[in-house]
Image: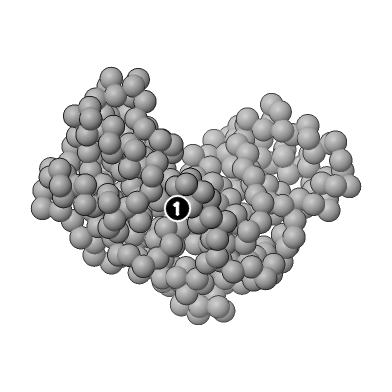
Amino acid sequence: MVNVAFELGNQIQEELEYSENIDLIRYDSLLIMGMGGSGVSGDVLALMSNEVSSKNIIVRKSYSVPKKIMEVNPFCLFISYSGNTEETLSGVKDAIKNNLNWAVISSGGKLIDLAIEHNKEFIKIPDGLQPRAAFGYLTQAVCKIVDLVEGTNFLKELRDVGDYLNEILNKKEDSEIFIEAKKIAKQVNKKTSVIYAGTDLCELVASRWKTQINENAKSKAFVGSIPEVHHNEILSWDADLEGSKSNYVLILLRDNSENSQIAKRLDLTQKLLGEKVEIINIEAKSQSTTLFKLMELVLLGDLFSLSLADELNMIPEDIEGIENLKKLLED
């Protein structure tokens, strides 16, 4: 799967398949539904849209469309890499039942079939991957949606990001970013990762890192938001100092666009917890736009989680536990 991570730059530049009238998509209120590796692309759409618009964007990761949301008559975007995710399909049924307008992003499955059957717009992405490995394709697809509605040029910028990612990965395993990822993996090893973030960008990245650690390395990871953890969780580090040092690693995701109070709180977190737990500070080296920082940090997290899987002798592609759960749900 490391080779797939190396393809992130190419994924965000590869041409996707669009339905005939995709350019007609418009909305004032948007509901995005998706789960897991597919659902995170909804978070990306919300992040990028919020940079340029005040439109109401709701990201839902569950079953059905709540009645309260239906009342605002949102445009619905359903995202499922496989096209067969039951939670997402349940949302489609609600949209059809309540005459909501909708579109889909998928590689195929029932979701594309339903879009064609009901004459709805779709973006089709290449199949054959696990959903979390299609992050580049999914990000490109949601940037297309934002560009259509907001008149932005995120897709053009994404092409530049792809060039940047390919440049920093030009030495593959000997690339600086991969060496950094392996270093982080050795620091974490068998410990539990706790990831703190203080901006919308870093909170999205933290969530991606967590799920990648979970799926690729089969390791526990938890996410906290600054300043929220300063009102509760920070006390937990005092309860078992020996256990904190031996069982946890705290990763602080930093962003050069942090406001002064968030920056101060993150600095104080480092100062107050530095003797209680090992701390790793991470910040995007590009220091550029949101898209550049997002994709660089996602790439670093992907490579870190894959390196951690190697450290722990885990097989990243093995998702037997998830598949077994799905079978039990079908019984």
Q: Is residue 306 above or below residue 62?
A: below
Q: For the view shown, which residue lies furthest in the right direction?
A: 242
The residue at 22%/34% (across/down) is 96
When asked about the image quadrant of residue 15, the answer is: bottom left
Q: Could you tell me residue 97's position as x and y percent?
A: 23, 30
Task: Determine the secondary structure under disc 1.
Answer: helix
When asked about the image quadrant of residue 10, the answer is: bottom left
Asked whether residue 191 appears in the rendered view, the answer is: yes
Q: For the view shown, which residue lies furthest in the left direction?
A: 20
Q: Is residue 173 above or below residue 144?
A: below
Q: Could you tell me how many numbered marks the image carries?
A: 1
Asked whether residue 121 appears in the rendered view, the answer is: no
CA neighbours of label 1 inside 10 A, class few (<14), some (14 to 19), many (20+):
many
Kindly identify which residue carries mark 1: 37
The residue at 87%/43% (across/down) is 241
The residue at 33%/47% (across/down) is 79
The residue at 84%/36% (across/down) is 238
Q: Is residue 101 left or right of residue 248?
A: left
Q: Is residue 287 above or below residue 233?
A: below
Q: Nearer the viewer, residue 184 or 131?
A: 131
| Type of colouring | one colour
Q: Could you tell me residue 317's position as x and y percent?
A: 52, 67
Q: Could you tell me residue 32's position as x and y percent?
A: 34, 38
Q: Could you tell me residue 199's position as x and y percent?
A: 53, 39
Q: Which kind of residue does numbered mark 1 sit on?
A: Gly
Q: Is residue 296 left or right of residue 102?
A: right
